[in-house]
Amino acid sequence: MWRYEKRLQYPVKITNPDPQMAMFIMSQYGGPDGEAGAAMRYLSQRYAMPYKEGKGILTDIGTEELGHMEIVAAIIQQLTRNLTPQEIEDSGFGPYYIDHTTGIWPQSAGGVPFSACAFQSKGDVITDLIEDMAAEQKARTTYDNILRLAKDPDVCDPIRWLREREVVHFQRFGEALRITQDNLNSRNFYAFNPAFDRMQGQ
Amino acid sequence: MMYDCEGVSMNMTEEAMRKQVYETGFALDDIILYLDTHPMDMNAMNYYRFMRQANEEAVRAYEQMFGPLMADRVMGDTWSWLDNPWPWEGGKR
């Protein structure tokens, strides 16, 4: 069960509109390595997680990703306030504007709609945790790509903060993987799926 | 299988206390939606206040016995957040 807290996890205060930057950053809302996919990935994977530390970290990082979706959405919303038709035409925001005006919709920077195919829930703890570590790195790379193009310090500040959280999550998933491997029956280290196969001798 | 009386009464208590949390929690969820579209309804506000207090008491009583319901409500010196069962683990044998 979730309850909503009426604040962003990290504040966003952008004064200058920049619809082109909004198009780029949108990828971290509903793109292939975005926050929506991250939240869905971890909150879906936790049902197959046998170990309490893993259940905790998937639940709590998955919950934080929901908060990150809200931060990214707030950035997009503030970057697309009070646009003139001329600004929309000149910035490349036109195609998005035609379909969504300035509403928030999950898609990649290239316009590909959000897809569950951008993440897996494999029902195998080792497989899932290694995907999670890769996912955090892919999101970190995307934030790095955004930071190379963003100039406005009001935009860079929350993006840098979101990037740091990817690094922290990567670290925590690495620890969850180590805990999982410590728990595994060493005789079957790589042949064994603790979410599905019965533990031998226990 | 033998039933020890203490275990049974413990389970009964947990079930009754959990029911209080579920019922007051859902009553709150429902009145919140109503108040969103009827923010001037004073009867609804009274019900909200009453139910919020009932929910706070039910949650506090439950957590004292069975551990935290939210990660920022861990009491004591150890990280008990991970100890009690997860909500999807009902009906486990």
Image (cartoon, coloured by chain):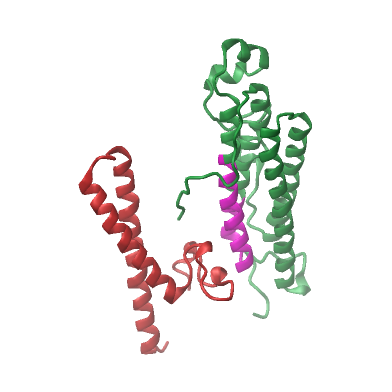
- Count the numbered circles shown: 0
Q: Quadrant of residue B39?
A: top left
Query: Which chain is assigned red?
Result: B
Whole-percent x, y for residue B41 in the image: 23, 42
**Res. A25 visible in picture:** yes
Residue positioned 52% across, 26% down in the render: A103
Whole-percent x, y for residue A89 in the image: 63, 12
Instruction: Compare residues A56 and A114 and report the one nearer the observer.
Output: A56
Residue positioned 72% across, 41% down in the render: A160
Side of B64 relative to A94 (left or right): left
Whole-percent x, y for residue A131 in the image: 71, 51
Residue A30: say if magenta.
Answer: no
Side of A3 relative to A43 (left or right): left
Q: From the image, give the main secondary structure of the stretch colored magenta.
A: helix
Quarter of the figure that contains the N terminus of chain B: bottom left
**Res. A51 visible in picture:** no
Instruction: Compare residues B71 and A122 and report the one nearer the observer.
Output: B71
Residue reaching furthest to the top: A86
Instruction: Compare residues B46 and A93 and report the one nearer the observer.
Output: B46
Residue A51: say if magenta.
Answer: yes
Residue range of the region highlighted in magenta in the rendering: A42-70
Q: Quadrant of residue B37?
A: top left
Whole-percent x, y for residue A109 in the image: 67, 28
Residue positioned 62% across, 23% down in the render: A17
Query: Which chain is assigned green?
Result: A
